[in-house]
Image: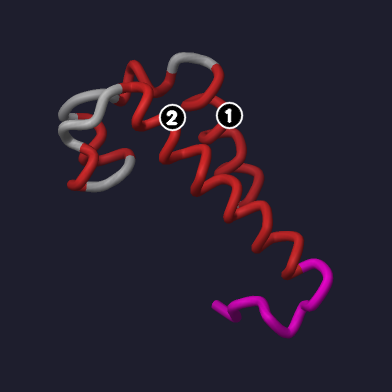
Amino acid sequence: MFILEGIYCWWVIGYGGAKWIEGWKSFFMIDWFALDWTAEQIRLYVLIIWGFSVIWFIVGVIKPELRFNY
């Protein structure tokens, strides 16, 4: 799951995915609050979320008891 999220974030940030998502598609790819965002705002949001995900992944590797059990 982490690998798929990483590929998605990499595409949005570095390969023009934010420009493609911009507009009505952002509702489905991000959430309702991103409908009016520009491509740069989408890139910043995804970068911040990706950063927190990486930190949480590292914490889960170091302390497995903090992971969520699905």
Q: Secondary structure at mark 2?
A: helix
Query: What residue is rendered at 51% in x and 45% in y?
Result: 48
Is residue 23 covered in magenta? no
Is residue 67 covered in magenta? yes
Q: Residue furthest right?
A: 62
Q: Secondary structure at mark 1?
A: helix
Q: Is residue 54 left or right of residue 35?
A: right
Mark 1 residue crowding within 10 angstroms, few (<14) / some (14–19) / many (20+): some
Numbered disc total: 2
Q: Is residue 62 left or right of residue 56?
A: right
Q: Position of residue 53 (x, y in %)?
A: 59, 54
Q: Looking at this view, is 48 or 14 the one in front?
A: 48
Q: Is residue 32 above or below residue 14?
A: below
Query: What residue is rendered at 20% in x and 46% in y?
Result: 33
Q: Is residue 21 left or right of residue 14?
A: left
Which residue is tagged 2?
43
Tell me the tag on residue 41.
none
Q: Quadrant of the C terminus?
A: bottom right
Q: Position of residue 45 (x, y in %)?
A: 41, 40
Q: Is residue 70 above or below residue 52?
A: below
Residue range highlighted in magenta: 61-70
Query: What residue is rendered at 18% in x and 47% in y?
Result: 32
Amino acid type at circle 2 is Arg
Q: Position of residue 57 (x, y in %)?
A: 69, 60
Query: What residue is rendered at 21% in x and 40% in y?
Result: 27
Which residue is tagged 1?
10
Amino acid type at circle 1 is Trp
